[in-house]
Image: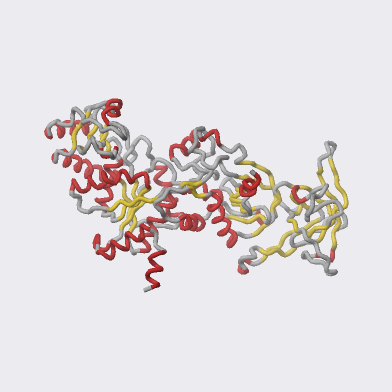
Amino acid sequence: MEETTEEKKSLNFIEQIIENDLAEGKNEKRIHTRFPPEPNGYLHIGHAKSIVLNFGLATKYAGKCNLRFDDTNPETEDEEYVNAIRNDVKWLGFQWDAEFNASDYFQKIYDYAVQLIKLDKAFVCELSAEQMREYHGTAVTPGKDSPYKNRSIEENLDLFDRMRKGEFPDGKYLLRAKIDMASPNMHFRDPALYRIRKKHHYRTGDQWNVYPMYDFAHGLSDAIEGITHSICTLEFEVHRPLYEWINNTLQTPTRPQQIEMSRLNLTYTVMSKRKLMQLVNEKHVSGWDDPRMPTVSGLRRRGYTAQAIREFCERVGISKRENLIDVSLLEFSIREDLNKKAPRVMGVLHPLKVVITNYPEGQVEELEAVNNPEDESAGKRMVPFSREIYIEQDDFLEVPAKKWFRLAPGAEVRLRYAYFVTCQEIIKDAAGKIVELRCTYDPASRGGNSPDGRKVKGTIHWVSASEGIGAQVRLYDRLFTHETPDKGEVDFKELINPNSLEVITAIVEPSLKLAQAGVSFQFERMGYFCVDKDSTPTQLVFNRTVTLKDAWAKIAEKI
């Protein structure tokens, strides 16, 4: 009995509702969920949370999950977005039981609207948009009935039929529900059900001149498909009475249960499709799959794995309370995943040339390197070493700070997998910039250990100058400088991080020469990097997925 109690405690509130429904025999003990995106943009990390939840519930309770495109707005929807959504859901690791479109039901939804008119529960209104606002009232004052609310059923049927046939211009009429203009719920004040839109629809062409409003089409689509649990975000809580009124009034064959949860709010990120569209259209980013975007395609291109995104969504959890999730949790999830699976390589992002003066000229030797210390099965590789190498500029200080264990004049460090080297000379250009270091090495320290047992605290990575290959590296950072860029009084675009992308030329070990797009690596000591689709046979391009440590946390500590 104690185990059952403990198990119940671990369930989120939606799972508790479902388990209670199953225990009571509701819906013939069926569980049927759906993921219903509008195809007017690309999916983002917030949608991923919904995908993980809806498909996860169907799997857990041996139910079904539909993919349904809520395509009721022909002006903004496109087949491009449909294909992108399908790809993203599959990439995240899920497969829908059936695919539908709200447009599949346009005739049925229209017929339901006619039925409402016949029940004297809907009327055709010709108030202008400005008049509608005036009649609607406020949160503290009731609205007023439209002067067209008492049209006869026959007149409403005639006008609605002529709306469908295209006899009237856009905006001339609306079909509205007859409910209660004094309701404290503004969404219950005779809401619009249909509007005239003489726009080409990507699926139905020019067949329709009227389109259902989202609130009308969504609940009916759920009922038509036999959805048992219709999960949405908290902003739809005030829409629930209308959702239920529509299905109850029309006595639809099934009565889905709407359940609301908190949406995903992420720091340093905007989640509004409209704002993401602005970023794309105004060229603040290179496209929907720009690695700085919170879109699933952008995260994938940056090097995020489906596993990491699913783990992140599980960690965030399901709640009724709006909260702000720190983006560092998402970054932690990808670090944890790639640490287990990403091969280790050496890449120097900001090269400083080092000449090992006592190493034989023209000699190149192969040194053994571990591919992934977290995975013994990953094996080892050979890395070429030569007289001239590159190290990171940041790994040398002419005047070393206290507790500096990297390279400095007269200091000895370990080259990863190679030898101990000691800096003997600094070469500068005419402007005084350090352009080269001259070092000596200890031949007896091959592999990084000295036979005399002397201790060397610092270990740095390197790449052979003669064998290494050049690569373009895109150093991506957070797109916004403010934690909540879309919550303040300032236009969110003014908060775009001017340093969100730095493009550099790095030197990487030759084992990466044939690296394929989409494959991730850990550049030792530097971070995780993914081969970009822009790579060619002659030019590798890497995207930085994430640094090894949370650099922003260090910045916050100083503020």
Answer above or below: position of 12 versus 171.
below
Q: Position of residue 283 (x, y in %)?
A: 53, 34
Q: Tell which residue pokes out farthest to the front in this image.
A: 140
Q: Write the residue at 17% across / 41% down.
A: 116
Q: Write the residue at 61% across / 41% down.
A: 501
Residue 448 relative to residue 53: left or right: right
Q: Considering depth in this image, is 359 or 524 the residue closer to the camera?
A: 524
Q: Tell which residue pokes out farthest to the bottom in this image.
A: 1
Q: Considering depth in this image, is 492 or 524 the residue closer to the camera?
A: 492
Q: Position of residue 148 (x, y in %)?
A: 18, 29
Residue 189 relative to residue 408: left or right: left
Q: Is residue 141 visible?
A: yes
Q: Considering depth in this image, is 291 or 479 the residue closer to the camera?
A: 479
Residue 512 relative to residue 78: left or right: right
Q: Write the residue at 40% across / 64% down.
A: 9
Residue 58 relative to residue 241: left or right: right
Scheme by which the image is coloured = secondary structure
Q: How many marks?
A: 0
Q: Quadrant of residue 3?
A: bottom left
Quadrant for the N terminus in the image:
bottom left
Q: Is residue 193 visible?
A: no
Q: Position of residue 265 (x, y in %)?
A: 47, 46
Quadrant for the C terminus in the image:
top right
